[in-house]
Image (tube, rainbow, N blue to C red):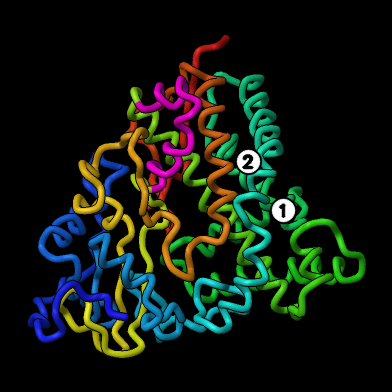
Amino acid sequence: MRTDSGPTDSVHTDPAPTTQLPSTRAAGCPFDPPQGLTRLRAEHPLSRLRYPDGHLGWLATGHRTVRAILADSRFSSRYELMHYPFPSGPEGGLPPAPVGDMTGIDAPEHTRYRRLLMGKFTVRRMRQLTARVEQITAEHLDVMERNGPGADLVTAFAQPVPALMICELLGVPYADRDTFHRHAATLMTMGVPPAEQAAAYQALQEYLHGLVLAKRAEPTDDLLGDLARDSDLSDEELSGLGTFLLVAGLDTTANMLAHGTFALLSNPAQAAALRNEPDLADRAVEELMRYLTVAHTMVRVALEDVEVDGRRISSGESVVLSVEAANRDPEAFPDPDTLDLHRRATGHLGFGHGIHQCLGQQLARVEMRVALPALLTRFPSLRLAVPPAEIPLRTDMNIYGVHRLPVTWDPA
Protein backbone atom coordinates (compact mmCIF):
# COMPACT_ATOMS: atom_id res chain seq x y z
CA MET A 1 0.00 0.00 0.00
CA ARG A 2 1.25 3.48 -0.87
CA THR A 3 0.11 6.80 0.54
CA ASP A 4 1.72 9.03 -2.07
CA SER A 5 -0.11 11.11 -4.63
CA GLY A 6 2.38 10.75 -7.47
CA PRO A 7 4.81 8.33 -9.09
CA THR A 8 7.59 6.92 -6.92
CA ASP A 9 10.35 8.50 -9.02
CA SER A 10 9.13 12.04 -8.35
CA VAL A 11 10.22 12.49 -4.74
CA HIS A 12 10.76 16.19 -4.10
CA THR A 13 13.75 17.77 -2.38
CA ASP A 14 13.06 18.30 1.32
CA PRO A 15 11.80 21.81 2.06
CA ALA A 16 13.41 24.08 4.62
CA PRO A 17 12.19 23.03 8.07
CA THR A 18 9.69 24.95 10.14
CA THR A 19 11.45 25.77 13.38
CA GLN A 20 8.52 25.00 15.68
CA LEU A 21 4.98 23.69 15.63
CA PRO A 22 2.61 26.66 15.13
CA SER A 23 0.42 26.97 18.21
CA THR A 24 -0.59 30.63 18.48
CA ARG A 25 -4.23 31.27 17.65
CA ALA A 26 -5.28 34.61 16.24
CA ALA A 27 -6.81 37.01 18.76
CA GLY A 28 -10.58 36.84 18.70
CA CYS A 29 -10.63 33.52 16.83
CA PRO A 30 -11.04 30.86 19.54
CA PHE A 31 -12.43 28.27 17.12
CA ASP A 32 -9.83 28.49 14.35
CA PRO A 33 -6.53 26.58 14.14
CA PRO A 34 -3.30 28.55 14.51
CA GLN A 35 -2.70 30.69 11.45
CA GLY A 36 0.73 29.17 10.97
CA LEU A 37 -0.85 25.78 10.31
CA THR A 38 -3.17 27.27 7.71
CA ARG A 39 -0.24 28.92 5.92
CA LEU A 40 1.80 25.71 5.86
CA ARG A 41 -1.15 23.68 4.58
CA ALA A 42 -1.59 26.14 1.70
CA GLU A 43 2.07 25.70 0.76
CA HIS A 44 2.16 21.88 0.95
CA PRO A 45 0.23 19.28 3.00
CA LEU A 46 3.53 17.90 4.36
CA SER A 47 6.25 20.16 5.78
CA ARG A 48 9.59 19.62 7.45
CA LEU A 49 9.47 20.35 11.20
CA ARG A 50 12.31 20.83 13.67
CA TYR A 51 11.21 19.34 17.00
CA PRO A 52 12.18 20.91 20.34
CA ASP A 53 14.72 18.14 21.01
CA GLY A 54 16.44 18.81 17.67
CA HIS A 55 14.84 15.94 15.75
CA LEU A 56 14.15 16.76 12.11
CA GLY A 57 10.75 15.28 11.33
CA TRP A 58 7.53 16.27 9.62
CA LEU A 59 4.23 18.09 10.03
CA ALA A 60 1.13 16.98 8.11
CA THR A 61 -1.66 19.53 7.68
CA GLY A 62 -3.62 18.36 4.61
CA HIS A 63 -6.75 16.27 5.09
CA ARG A 64 -5.84 13.58 2.56
CA THR A 65 -2.30 13.35 3.95
CA VAL A 66 -3.32 13.07 7.60
CA ARG A 67 -6.01 10.51 6.78
CA ALA A 68 -3.60 8.40 4.73
CA ILE A 69 -0.95 8.33 7.47
CA LEU A 70 -3.51 7.39 10.13
CA ALA A 71 -4.57 4.43 7.98
CA ASP A 72 -1.03 3.25 7.14
CA SER A 73 0.39 0.42 9.27
CA ARG A 74 3.91 1.53 8.37
CA PHE A 75 3.45 4.35 10.89
CA SER A 76 3.61 3.52 14.60
CA SER A 77 1.70 4.97 17.56
CA ARG A 78 4.23 3.79 20.15
CA TYR A 79 5.10 6.62 22.50
CA GLU A 80 8.69 5.53 23.09
CA LEU A 81 9.47 5.90 19.37
CA MET A 82 8.05 9.43 19.12
CA HIS A 83 9.68 12.82 19.38
CA TYR A 84 7.47 15.19 21.34
CA PRO A 85 6.45 18.23 19.27
CA PHE A 86 5.74 20.67 22.10
CA PRO A 87 8.43 22.67 23.94
CA SER A 88 7.35 21.29 27.31
CA GLY A 89 8.24 17.70 26.46
CA PRO A 90 9.94 15.37 28.92
CA GLU A 91 13.72 15.16 28.82
CA GLY A 92 14.97 11.91 27.36
CA GLY A 93 11.80 11.26 25.36
CA LEU A 94 8.47 9.65 26.15
CA PRO A 95 8.24 6.37 28.08
CA PRO A 96 6.34 3.38 26.66
CA ALA A 97 2.57 3.43 27.04
CA PRO A 98 1.30 2.18 30.39
CA VAL A 99 -0.50 -1.14 30.30
CA GLY A 100 -3.99 -0.59 28.91
CA ASP A 101 -3.27 2.72 27.16
CA MET A 102 -4.50 1.83 23.67
CA THR A 103 -3.38 5.07 22.01
CA GLY A 104 0.31 4.31 22.49
CA ILE A 105 0.58 0.75 21.17
CA ASP A 106 0.47 -1.04 17.82
CA ALA A 107 -0.91 -4.35 16.58
CA PRO A 108 -1.06 -7.12 17.65
CA GLU A 109 -1.32 -5.89 21.26
CA HIS A 110 -3.71 -3.13 20.24
CA THR A 111 -5.81 -5.57 18.19
CA ARG A 112 -6.32 -7.84 21.19
CA TYR A 113 -7.67 -5.02 23.37
CA ARG A 114 -9.74 -3.54 20.57
CA ARG A 115 -11.50 -6.83 19.84
CA LEU A 116 -12.41 -7.23 23.49
CA LEU A 117 -13.98 -3.77 23.65
CA MET A 118 -15.55 -3.22 20.23
CA GLY A 119 -18.68 -5.17 21.08
CA LYS A 120 -19.21 -2.97 24.14
CA PHE A 121 -19.31 0.25 22.09
CA THR A 122 -21.42 -0.60 19.04
CA VAL A 123 -23.84 1.91 17.51
CA ARG A 124 -26.78 -0.23 18.64
CA ARG A 125 -25.60 -0.54 22.25
CA MET A 126 -24.80 3.15 22.53
CA ARG A 127 -28.16 4.20 21.07
CA GLN A 128 -29.80 2.03 23.71
CA LEU A 129 -28.33 4.43 26.25
CA THR A 130 -30.18 7.40 24.73
CA ALA A 131 -32.97 7.36 27.31
CA ARG A 132 -30.45 7.45 30.16
CA VAL A 133 -28.54 10.32 28.53
CA GLU A 134 -31.84 12.19 28.15
CA GLN A 135 -32.63 11.62 31.82
CA ILE A 136 -29.21 12.78 33.04
CA THR A 137 -29.34 15.80 30.75
CA ALA A 138 -32.81 16.81 31.96
CA GLU A 139 -31.77 16.44 35.61
CA HIS A 140 -28.82 18.79 35.17
CA LEU A 141 -30.87 21.29 33.21
CA ASP A 142 -33.42 21.22 36.04
CA VAL A 143 -30.69 22.09 38.54
CA MET A 144 -29.43 24.91 36.33
CA GLU A 145 -32.95 26.29 36.02
CA ARG A 146 -33.54 26.16 39.77
CA ASN A 147 -30.21 27.82 40.57
CA GLY A 148 -30.15 30.31 37.69
CA PRO A 149 -30.09 32.37 35.79
CA GLY A 150 -26.30 32.14 35.47
CA ALA A 151 -23.88 29.22 35.63
CA ASP A 152 -20.48 27.98 34.61
CA LEU A 153 -21.59 25.58 31.90
CA VAL A 154 -18.43 23.48 32.29
CA THR A 155 -19.06 22.43 35.88
CA ALA A 156 -22.87 22.63 35.79
CA PHE A 157 -23.45 20.66 32.59
CA ALA A 158 -20.59 19.83 30.24
CA GLN A 159 -18.54 17.81 32.71
CA PRO A 160 -21.18 15.95 34.74
CA VAL A 161 -23.25 14.57 31.83
CA PRO A 162 -20.45 12.53 30.18
CA ALA A 163 -18.85 11.79 33.55
CA LEU A 164 -22.03 10.17 34.84
CA MET A 165 -22.40 8.15 31.64
CA ILE A 166 -18.84 6.81 31.56
CA CYS A 167 -18.98 6.01 35.29
CA GLU A 168 -22.22 4.07 34.85
CA LEU A 169 -20.95 2.31 31.76
CA LEU A 170 -17.71 1.22 33.41
CA GLY A 171 -19.17 0.63 36.87
CA VAL A 172 -17.17 3.35 38.64
CA PRO A 173 -18.70 5.32 41.56
CA TYR A 174 -19.61 8.81 40.37
CA ALA A 175 -19.15 10.08 43.93
CA ASP A 176 -15.39 9.90 43.33
CA ARG A 177 -15.57 12.25 40.33
CA ASP A 178 -13.49 15.03 41.92
CA THR A 179 -10.56 12.63 42.13
CA PHE A 180 -11.04 11.57 38.49
CA HIS A 181 -11.19 15.12 37.19
CA ARG A 182 -8.16 16.25 39.18
CA HIS A 183 -5.95 13.43 37.94
CA ALA A 184 -7.32 13.64 34.38
CA ALA A 185 -6.50 17.37 34.29
CA THR A 186 -2.92 16.58 35.33
CA LEU A 187 -2.59 13.99 32.58
CA MET A 188 -4.05 16.29 29.91
CA THR A 189 -2.04 19.44 30.74
CA MET A 190 1.00 20.11 28.59
CA GLY A 191 4.07 21.15 30.57
CA VAL A 192 3.27 19.19 33.72
CA PRO A 193 6.50 17.49 34.89
CA PRO A 194 6.62 13.80 33.90
CA ALA A 195 6.88 12.75 37.54
CA GLU A 196 3.57 14.49 38.34
CA GLN A 197 1.85 12.92 35.34
CA ALA A 198 3.18 9.50 36.31
CA ALA A 199 1.92 9.98 39.86
CA ALA A 200 -1.54 10.98 38.60
CA TYR A 201 -1.74 7.96 36.33
CA GLN A 202 -0.52 5.67 39.11
CA ALA A 203 -3.15 7.04 41.49
CA LEU A 204 -5.92 6.41 38.96
CA GLN A 205 -4.65 2.93 38.20
CA GLU A 206 -4.45 2.03 41.90
CA TYR A 207 -8.03 3.23 42.33
CA LEU A 208 -9.21 1.15 39.36
CA HIS A 209 -7.20 -1.82 40.63
CA GLY A 210 -9.23 -1.80 43.83
CA LEU A 211 -12.45 -1.79 41.80
CA VAL A 212 -11.21 -4.63 39.62
CA LEU A 213 -10.44 -6.80 42.63
CA ALA A 214 -13.93 -6.12 44.01
CA LYS A 215 -15.52 -7.04 40.66
CA ARG A 216 -13.44 -10.21 40.46
CA ALA A 217 -14.86 -11.23 43.83
CA GLU A 218 -18.41 -10.14 43.02
CA PRO A 219 -19.04 -9.43 39.30
CA THR A 220 -21.28 -6.49 38.47
CA ASP A 221 -23.48 -5.70 35.48
CA ASP A 222 -21.22 -3.14 33.81
CA LEU A 223 -18.30 -3.06 31.40
CA LEU A 224 -15.55 -3.66 33.95
CA GLY A 225 -17.64 -6.36 35.59
CA ASP A 226 -18.21 -8.10 32.26
CA LEU A 227 -14.49 -8.02 31.43
CA ALA A 228 -13.56 -9.23 34.91
CA ARG A 229 -15.88 -12.19 34.45
CA ASP A 230 -15.53 -13.05 30.77
CA SER A 231 -12.07 -12.01 29.54
CA ASP A 232 -8.56 -13.33 30.06
CA LEU A 233 -7.24 -9.88 30.99
CA SER A 234 -4.91 -9.70 33.98
CA ASP A 235 -5.72 -7.41 36.88
CA GLU A 236 -3.07 -4.98 35.63
CA GLU A 237 -4.50 -4.97 32.10
CA LEU A 238 -8.07 -4.49 33.26
CA SER A 239 -7.06 -1.69 35.63
CA GLY A 240 -5.11 -0.02 32.83
CA LEU A 241 -7.95 -0.28 30.34
CA GLY A 242 -10.36 1.08 32.93
CA THR A 243 -8.07 4.04 33.56
CA PHE A 244 -7.72 4.70 29.83
CA LEU A 245 -11.48 4.56 29.18
CA LEU A 246 -12.34 6.66 32.22
CA VAL A 247 -9.95 9.50 31.35
CA ALA A 248 -11.00 9.47 27.70
CA GLY A 249 -14.68 9.47 28.59
CA LEU A 250 -14.33 12.33 31.06
CA ASP A 251 -12.43 14.91 29.07
CA THR A 252 -13.16 14.80 25.34
CA THR A 253 -16.96 14.91 25.29
CA ALA A 254 -17.03 17.43 28.14
CA ASN A 255 -14.95 19.80 26.05
CA MET A 256 -17.06 19.23 22.97
CA LEU A 257 -20.20 20.12 24.94
CA ALA A 258 -18.67 23.27 26.43
CA HIS A 259 -16.71 24.45 23.40
CA GLY A 260 -19.57 23.46 21.11
CA THR A 261 -21.94 25.63 23.13
CA PHE A 262 -19.44 28.50 22.95
CA ALA A 263 -19.32 28.12 19.16
CA LEU A 264 -23.10 27.97 18.84
CA LEU A 265 -23.65 31.02 21.06
CA SER A 266 -21.12 32.82 18.87
CA ASN A 267 -23.16 31.83 15.80
CA PRO A 268 -26.78 32.59 16.79
CA ALA A 269 -28.27 31.51 13.45
CA GLN A 270 -26.68 28.07 13.85
CA ALA A 271 -27.91 27.80 17.45
CA ALA A 272 -31.42 28.69 16.29
CA ALA A 273 -31.26 26.07 13.55
CA LEU A 274 -30.31 23.34 16.03
CA ARG A 275 -33.03 24.48 18.43
CA ASN A 276 -35.75 24.58 15.79
CA GLU A 277 -34.86 21.64 13.54
CA PRO A 278 -34.90 18.37 15.53
CA ASP A 279 -33.66 16.36 12.55
CA LEU A 280 -30.50 18.45 12.38
CA ALA A 281 -28.84 16.95 15.47
CA ASP A 282 -26.85 14.23 13.69
CA ARG A 283 -25.38 16.62 11.13
CA ALA A 284 -24.72 19.18 13.85
CA VAL A 285 -22.61 16.74 15.85
CA GLU A 286 -20.44 15.86 12.85
CA GLU A 287 -20.00 19.50 11.82
CA LEU A 288 -19.06 20.57 15.35
CA MET A 289 -16.53 17.73 15.53
CA ARG A 290 -15.02 18.95 12.26
CA TYR A 291 -15.15 22.64 13.02
CA LEU A 292 -13.77 22.48 16.57
CA THR A 293 -11.49 19.39 16.53
CA VAL A 294 -10.71 19.47 20.25
CA ALA A 295 -8.32 16.49 19.87
CA HIS A 296 -6.13 18.70 17.75
CA THR A 297 -2.77 16.94 17.38
CA MET A 298 -1.47 13.38 16.97
CA VAL A 299 1.98 11.94 16.30
CA ARG A 300 3.08 8.91 14.29
CA VAL A 301 6.52 7.43 13.57
CA ALA A 302 7.64 5.85 10.30
CA LEU A 303 8.71 2.23 10.76
CA GLU A 304 10.28 2.19 7.30
CA ASP A 305 10.90 4.65 4.48
CA VAL A 306 7.53 5.81 3.17
CA GLU A 307 6.72 8.18 0.33
CA VAL A 308 3.88 10.59 1.08
CA ASP A 309 2.77 13.38 -1.25
CA GLY A 310 5.99 13.22 -3.21
CA ARG A 311 8.22 13.43 -0.13
CA ARG A 312 10.13 10.60 1.49
CA ILE A 313 9.62 10.12 5.22
CA SER A 314 12.57 8.09 6.47
CA SER A 315 12.36 5.27 8.97
CA GLY A 316 12.40 6.63 12.53
CA GLU A 317 11.14 10.10 11.64
CA SER A 318 8.21 11.46 13.62
CA VAL A 319 5.23 13.06 11.90
CA VAL A 320 2.96 15.50 13.70
CA LEU A 321 -0.59 15.16 12.40
CA SER A 322 -2.48 18.43 12.74
CA VAL A 323 -6.03 17.13 12.77
CA GLU A 324 -7.43 20.62 13.33
CA ALA A 325 -5.72 21.89 10.15
CA ALA A 326 -6.84 18.81 8.20
CA ASN A 327 -10.45 19.34 9.20
CA ARG A 328 -10.28 22.90 7.83
CA ASP A 329 -8.73 21.84 4.51
CA PRO A 330 -10.67 23.52 1.66
CA GLU A 331 -9.84 20.57 -0.61
CA ALA A 332 -11.95 18.37 1.67
CA PHE A 333 -14.60 20.80 2.93
CA PRO A 334 -15.82 23.82 0.93
CA ASP A 335 -15.80 27.06 2.91
CA PRO A 336 -14.17 25.17 5.80
CA ASP A 337 -13.88 28.08 8.23
CA THR A 338 -17.66 28.54 8.35
CA LEU A 339 -19.74 26.64 10.91
CA ASP A 340 -22.64 25.20 8.92
CA LEU A 341 -24.78 22.66 10.74
CA HIS A 342 -26.54 21.76 7.51
CA ARG A 343 -23.22 20.58 6.03
CA ARG A 344 -22.60 16.88 5.52
CA ALA A 345 -19.21 16.76 7.23
CA THR A 346 -18.54 13.24 5.99
CA GLY A 347 -14.94 12.15 6.35
CA HIS A 348 -13.93 14.53 9.14
CA LEU A 349 -11.12 13.33 11.38
CA GLY A 350 -12.46 14.60 14.69
CA PHE A 351 -12.64 11.03 16.00
CA GLY A 352 -9.38 10.06 14.30
CA HIS A 353 -9.11 7.41 11.60
CA GLY A 354 -7.69 3.94 11.12
CA ILE A 355 -7.17 1.36 13.82
CA HIS A 356 -6.94 4.00 16.55
CA GLN A 357 -10.21 5.71 15.66
CA CYS A 358 -11.99 6.72 18.87
CA LEU A 359 -13.46 3.65 20.54
CA GLY A 360 -16.15 5.67 22.32
CA GLN A 361 -17.22 7.79 19.36
CA GLN A 362 -20.76 6.38 19.30
CA LEU A 363 -21.29 7.20 22.97
CA ALA A 364 -19.94 10.72 22.38
CA ARG A 365 -22.34 11.15 19.46
CA VAL A 366 -25.31 10.12 21.59
CA GLU A 367 -24.30 12.50 24.39
CA MET A 368 -23.85 15.48 22.06
CA ARG A 369 -26.94 14.65 19.98
CA VAL A 370 -29.07 14.73 23.13
CA ALA A 371 -27.40 17.36 25.31
CA LEU A 372 -26.82 20.27 22.94
CA PRO A 373 -30.38 20.57 21.53
CA ALA A 374 -31.84 20.04 25.00
CA LEU A 375 -29.72 22.85 26.45
CA LEU A 376 -30.68 25.31 23.70
CA THR A 377 -34.35 24.36 23.90
CA ARG A 378 -34.57 24.64 27.68
CA PHE A 379 -32.85 28.05 27.64
CA PRO A 380 -33.74 29.75 24.34
CA SER A 381 -32.22 33.02 25.60
CA LEU A 382 -28.93 31.34 26.60
CA ARG A 383 -25.97 33.66 26.05
CA LEU A 384 -22.44 34.31 27.26
CA ALA A 385 -22.28 36.12 30.59
CA VAL A 386 -18.91 37.73 29.77
CA PRO A 387 -17.34 39.07 26.56
CA PRO A 388 -15.96 36.25 24.35
CA ALA A 389 -12.40 37.50 24.85
CA GLU A 390 -12.72 36.76 28.59
CA ILE A 391 -13.49 33.06 28.11
CA PRO A 392 -10.38 31.14 29.33
CA LEU A 393 -9.23 28.78 26.59
CA ARG A 394 -7.47 25.46 27.12
CA THR A 395 -4.41 26.38 25.06
CA ASP A 396 -2.25 24.49 27.55
CA MET A 397 -4.11 21.18 27.20
CA ASN A 398 -3.89 18.16 24.92
CA ILE A 399 -7.66 18.49 24.47
CA TYR A 400 -8.65 22.00 23.40
CA GLY A 401 -11.73 23.78 24.70
CA VAL A 402 -12.57 26.17 27.52
CA HIS A 403 -11.68 26.04 31.21
CA ARG A 404 -14.90 27.88 32.12
CA LEU A 405 -17.94 29.07 30.19
CA PRO A 406 -20.00 31.64 32.15
CA VAL A 407 -23.49 31.77 30.67
CA THR A 408 -26.81 33.35 31.60
CA TRP A 409 -30.39 33.44 30.37
CA ASP A 410 -33.66 35.22 30.94
CA PRO A 411 -35.74 33.84 33.83
CA ALA A 412 -38.93 32.06 32.86
Spatial CA distance of label 1 from label 2 is: 12 Å
Left or right: 233 in relation to 277: right
Secondary structure of residue under mark 1: helix
Q: Position of residue 309 (x, y in %)?
A: 18, 73
Q: What main secondary structure does the magenta stretch of the protein show?
A: helix
Between 326 and 213, the residue placed more toward the observer is 326
- Return the residue found at the far right: 218
State whether residue 368 is above or below residue 210: above
State whether residue 310 is above or below residue 296: below
Q: Mark 1 — residue?
A: 169
| Region in magenta | 270-289
Q: Position of residue 329 (x, y in %)?
A: 23, 53
Question: Which quarter of the image is occupied by the N terminus?
Answer: bottom left
Q: Mark 2 — residue?
A: 161
The residue lying at 32 percent from left, 88 percent from top is: 316
Query: Magenta span has 288?
Result: yes
Q: Quadrant of residue 359?
A: bottom right
The residue lying at 38 percent from left, 37 percent from top is: 391
Q: Amino acid at mark 2?
A: Val
